[in-house]
Image (cartoon, rainbow, N blue to C red):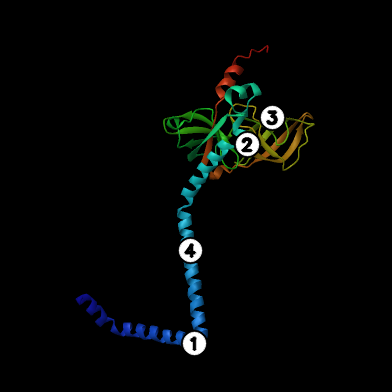
Amino acid sequence: MRNLLRFIDRYQVLLLFVLLEILSLTLVFSKNRFQSAFFFNSARFISGAMSRTVGSVFDYLALEENNRKLAEENVALRSRLRSAYRNVSAEETAYRDSIYKQQFIYSSAEVVGNSVNKQYNYITLNKGRSQGIEPDMAVLCSQGIVGIVTGVSDNFSTVISVLNKDFRVSSKLKGSDYFGALMWDGIGAQSGLLTDIPHHAKIGVGDTIVTSGLSPIFPEGIPIGIIDNFSLDDGNFYNIKVHFLTDFHRLRYVSVVKNFYKEEQLLLESRITPND
């Protein structure tokens, strides 16, 4: 209490001035409609601007959590898509009582390590063997393909990125059965080369390139990129430059894809002899 009295005694002139100013403004705004309207409109404007600013700050702070939730929702939705299921025959249906049997299942992961400026780039994820991640599982993001899991520990996994000179993926023109091999061109982080598309295939700049589904790793129809330009190689096959849809500089949340039929397909293909 003594400190309060000292404060009032020390600043009594200033406090009296502030009190008189508040009283004067109150009388002006209460007796004059124009000043009153101006005051309240200004107060609303300032209050609204402060609310928007505070809201933007909170939205920014919650952005990471929202992105994580969206990634998990995308994974759940991908697992429900018809493309994640295999159409079984009528004979199988009679025994399994289902027209479709799930072939792919998706799980979410977060990128905790990523390189884009080397010739052999790799990505590290925060999920591993304990979370069901295995080698040779496809890795996708909301924009398109990312890479393939190459190694796993209990709680982490490494991924060979699309931006790796050793990476190959079977790809095709969207809406067409013409397929070829897509690889990184080693230049920048946004373009690759698609080869083995025959010269009689109808292609054009801006056409979409997707996964072919001919490997047991990637589901069919996953976006890869769009055609930037193309040329004929010795008149038989196209050399197609593809602009990747995935922004590898901003990877954060990804989906890891398990193919329930992969081992069966690989086992059967391993039994093929050179004369077959």
Between 236 and 221, which is closer to the camera in this rendering?
Answer: 221
Closer to the chain start, of discs 1 and 3, is 1
- The residues tagged by marks 1 and 2 sit, at their Cα atoms, a distance apart of 67 Å
The amino acid on which the numbered mark 4 sits, given as a three-letter code, is: Thr
Disc 3 secondary structure class: strand
Q: In terms of image quadrants, where is residue 16?
A: bottom left
Q: Residues within 10 Å of mark 1 (few under 14, many from 20)?
A: few
Closer to the chain start, of discs 4 and 1, is 1
Q: Tell me the residue at 67%/35% (across/down).
A: 193
Query: Residue 81's spot in the image, x, y percent?
Result: 60, 37
Query: Residue 18's spot in the image, x, y percent?
Result: 36, 82
- The residue that mark 2 highlights is 222
Residue 195 visible in rendering: yes
- The residue that mark 1 highlights is 32
- The residue that mark 4 highlights is 53
Q: Is residue 201 left or right of residue 242?
A: right
Labelled disc at residue 180:
3
Q: Nearer the viewer, mark 1 or mark 2?
A: 1
Q: Is residue 19 left or right of residue 240?
A: left
